[in-house]
Image (cartoon, coloured by chain):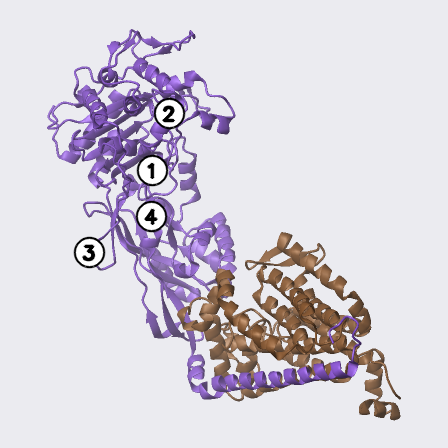
Chain colours: A purple, B brown
Amino acid sequence: MSSRFALKDHFRESRLINDRLIFAALFAGILFIVVMVRLAILQIVEYEHFSSLSNQNRVDIGPLPPQRGLIYDRNGVILAENIPTFSLELTPENVPDLEATLAELALMFSITEEEITEIKKRIKRQRGFRQFIFRQRLTEQEVAVFSVNRHQFPGVDVVGRLIRHYPQGALFSHAVGYVGRINERDLKRIDQQNYKGTQQIGKTGVERYYENLLHGQVGYQQVETNVQGRIVRELQNVPSVSGKDLFLHLDINLQRVATEALGDFNGAVVALEPQTGGVLAMVSKPDFDPNLFVSGISTKDYSVLRDSLDRPLFDRSLRGHYPPGSTLKPFVALAGLELGLVNEQTQSFCPGWFTLPGQEHRYRCWKSHGHGKVDLKKSLAQSCDVYFYDLAHALGIDPLHDFLDIFGFGHRTGVDIPSESKGLSPSSEWKRTKRNQAWYPGETVISGIGQGFNQTTPIQLAHATATLAMRGVDIKPKVARASRNNGANELQLIGTEKADALAMDSSQHWEAVIDSMVEVVHGKRGTARHIGKNLPFKMAGKTGTAQVFGIKQDEKYDAETLAKKLHDHALFIAFAPADNPEIVIAVVVENGGSGSRAAAPIARKIVDQYFGITADE
Amino acid sequence: MNNMLRDRANPQRWSITQTLRKIHLDAVLLLGLLTLLSAGLIILYSAGDQSSALMVRQVTRMAAAFLGLLVLANIHPDRMRDASYWIYGAGLILLIAVLAFGHEGKGAQRWLDLGFFRFQPSELMKLAVPLLVATYLAERPLAPSVPRLIIGLMMVILPSLLIAKQPDLGTSLLIASSGLIVIFLSGISWRIIIGFIITCTAALPVLWYKMHDYQRQRVLTFLNPESDPLGSGYHIIQSKIAIGSGGLFGRGWLEGTQSHLAFLPERSTDFIFSVIAEEFGLLGVGLILFLYLLIAGRGLYIASQAQTSFARLLAGSISMTFLVYVFVNVGMVTGLLPVVGVPLPLVSYGGTSMVTLLAGFGILMSIHTHRRMMSP
């Protein structure tokens, strides 16, 4: 019958369809009965229940925001806490005349016209029936003045809230970071349900990285309200779960010493505990007061911070790109030993310069009349450039790049703070793909002393030094040590992440380089010998002085500032004790001049503080 | 047929019906629709917080939609059949265009901005799909052979998937069901139908895997609304309170507290049924539902009286889809079905679906009034 040529049998077809239509009608009738039964259950059987819910005034559900976890340093000193404040809040839908109310409030709290316009814009943007914070941190006097006049302001209330406070001020501005008002961009990365009622969110540093831990879980309360929306009775309360407290590796004493030691210089200091990767100190100068950001920074304050030529908001410890200079030499030396190009006895002659075969250009040593005959130890201790020009040239850029790679140069360390930079460890492939240029041998030569394209961040330098100090054990730096559930006693450790130890052909290679770095601090002619006195153990170090090349920002200021901007960056890496390291330090002093003068003493001060050595000079 | 004979015998007595007939309108259907639309306006006045601007916009849309009904009623069903492939093809292209450069609203792309007005191609598909499937299946003797059945199914599935991708699950399901109803009416064997139902049940886990997060959230909330009282569960909790507190007789027009104190969300659109239940009680919603049944019943009657298989299939599908619409919406607001965002037909505030629905009734009227009299 389904043959192409079958004739249509109208009578049969209409009966077929009509049968189905009858079936469909029956089905519709059944659905009708199901729905009516459902409605009867809701409206007759459960009528009492629902009408009481609806009747004795309405049920409202309000979020109970969780309390944010606290942040402690390793000694239990509070770095971030929550303090109670009063804020003036209004629910726009409950304010009869918003314009007039805002105008009156502006008068009462002496708020400018522009700020009111801004506030109006923000009110418009927010969702319906939500509290709008008009002004935070009211003084007692302001609370009193408003309370007296409160009857004139329906829909406006003084509300007690906890807000974030950083008792240490600027000291941890970069490492711990700060919280701020939740903005549109934040809304995209969070579970919005969980942030109902929450006003602030971690914006930078630990506050941002551990946002999930610190924030906690929102609770809610089901309440009866009267017609004006005031709460009459609580029906149900699901309490919020406070965020976890966070215990950091950071040590406030080391942080303070490092900050003070940097003095008026810009720069960064990172100190690590090499056994765990724990970050003991992390300083970036200049710093700023994170408390300014908590309740919304004023435009004026913000433009001061943003427009400052010293860029205080920029975290140099994680994002500052500096040529490593001579601090790269221990790693180049290790590459030379490991790849069999030199041994401890191999000697080079330093006449004060180096030339590539067949070329005339002289690559100069910092010591213009030369170091004479140098071996590995001497060249590191006195930071002879010619030895490393020679070695780098022999190595070639790509083997050198590959070797530096395993120490993490050119890679993020993965520290638990967001927006770290990668730095740059050049290779011929990098230059070809990124710049579309060939690699020149002369560029290999200056790479050997950490100049040229090489860019490292202070955290990267500290991490590489820690790997060296640990004889090849690569541990990821961590700022946070443990977390604790609110109200609980026991800590939940945040594990350390250890990569496999780097296998060297001979463990003697590690010791040769580390011995040479001890010579830097303790040797007769070591470049940092002035910081090696009165130490109960051996300390290993390496100075670095990096030339400042072009200036990136558009400068238009007087010669004095310009001159300072062109001073060399001073660098120093160190660890102590050399045979069983407990602390690793990387110091960068922008435009500080020489590494041995400006940077090394800072490391010594940190070591003194860490081991409780009292300097008696 | 009896009616018709009487019509011809007593022209004076049936003058209104006759006049309407001349402009191809069906008096019974028209009366039902006008009653429902008027009831809808009364409810909307309350649900929309007595906003006259809202009323004016809704009445304007109704007028425009009626114009559409009138136009379609005067087009012969055979012309619609001739154009069905073209309409479907154009709709499909527009759907793809929407996915490519449509406008986003609430995380979904549904609109196509044509400069002078915005257009939702999925609305066109609500009519184009049953039209095409009815045309295609009626080309050959019924019930359809297996290959023709498969091709017919593809005609349904393709646009449904495109619309589900926008994503607009509610409309996608409605369009799929309008096409499936045609296939069901075409007389395929019960074995295939039961097999299909079993396959669909088995496919549920796959569907779950393919769903968007917000759609999954809706399903989860549907299964346990109390789990998320701050978020999507709020709608259902508040809707049930509104319905339940209406009782047998309701709180009275404009007296619903759930609706007027803004506890009930989307109360002039998707949740308008809860407003009826709160203010007019079980009796009120019973009457409204009965009215829906009457209108759909007249549609089914028109289908049974149609003269071609094509017209029967199309009329049957339009009438049944209309009911599916109602039951999905009512099921949703009473907590029987997940919240899929389907408005209550002809009552909810909103223009696009009103135009499509009345256009569908225009087709029904055209089918009924273009019949050829076989015998005097």
Q: Nearer the viewer, residue B253 or A495?
A: A495
Q: Residues within 10 Å of mark 4 (few under 14, many from 20)?
A: many
Quick one: A536 or A221, which is closer to the camera? A536
Q: CA distance from mark 1 to mark 4?
A: 19 Å
- In primary-sequence order, the first of circles 2 and 3 is 2
The residue indicated by pointer 3 is A490
User: Could you confirm whether marks 2 and 3 are on the same chain?
Assistant: yes
Q: Earlier in the sequence, mark 1 or mark 4?
A: 4
Mark 1 or mark 2, whichever is nearer to me: 2
The three-letter code of the residue at mark 2 reads Pro
Left or right: residue B249 compared with residue A395: right
Secondary-structure class at tag 4: helix
Residue behind mark 2:
A399
Q: Which residue is denoted by mark 1 in the rendering?
A: A413
Q: Are marks 2 and 3 in contact (CB under 8 Å)?
A: no
Q: CA distance from mark 2 to mark 3?
A: 48 Å
Measure how far apart labels 4 and 3 are at the Cα level: 22 Å
Amino acid carrying label 1: it is: Thr
Residue at image mark 4: A207
